[in-house]
Amino acid sequence: MHNYGTLDSSYKAAGGEAGVRRLVNEFYHQMESQKRGQHIRAMHKDNLDIVKDKLSLFLMAWLGGPRNYAEKYGGISIPMVHQHLIIGEEERDAWLFCMEEALKHQDYDTTFKKYLIEQLALPAEKIMQVSQMAHS
């Protein structure tokens, strides 16, 4: 039995900062290389350095690790940050698909990969809902 979601157990399961940054780099690689991810890749600027850093720092804290995002970038509401974008089911599903593909390349326990994608589906759904409300 795994205790993901308790204290820093998920952060540790992800390999700490180095593991989270590897996941984020692979995620954006998948977004660029997978046909299904190209539409959501086009929503980003050409240079992904800041976006990668922001997602890495956010995920570290979200997984129970260091909370350095606010220190560096200020407070954040993930759904509100994305509300200017038009995000429907296609975009939500493409994002989750790219993350699943990125997870395949991580040396994480299989149960953690499953747990993580299930947990990431929750904010992905909320982002879509906020976007749809903003654009209706």
Image (spheres, grey):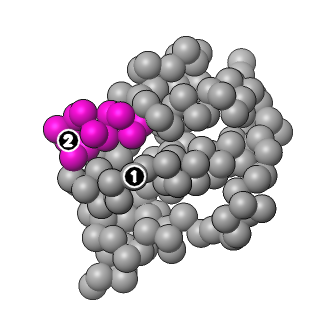
Secondary structure of the residue carrying numbered label 1: loop
Question: Which one is earlier in the sequence, the residue at label 2 or at label 1?
Answer: 2
Left or right: 55, with 121 as reference point = right
Q: Which mark is residue 36?
A: 2
Q: Is residue 15 left or right of residue 8?
A: left
Locate residue 69, reporting x and y percent: 70, 57
Q: Is residue 68 above or below residue 112?
A: below
User: In the displayed image of the protein, which residue is found farthest to the left?
Assistant: 35
Residue density around tag 2, few if under 14, some if 14–19, many if 20 or more, within 10 Å: some
At a point 67% along the width and 65% down the height, the residue shown is 73
Residue 119 within the segment the image draws in magenta: no
SS type, badge 2: helix
Select label 2 or label 1 by which is in front: 1
Residue at image coords 41%, 74%: 83
Judging depth in this view, the residue of 63 and 3 nearest the camera is 63
Q: What stretch is highlighted in magenta?
A: 27-38
Where residue 98 appears, x then y in whole percent?
Answer: 34, 37
Image quadrant in which you'd find residue 17: top right
Q: Where is residue 29 in the image (x, y as percent from the top left)?
A: 35, 34
Residue drawn at x 46%, y 63% is 126
Q: Where is residue 54 in the image (x, y as percent from the top left)?
A: 58, 54
Q: Which amino acid does label 1 sit on?
A: Asn
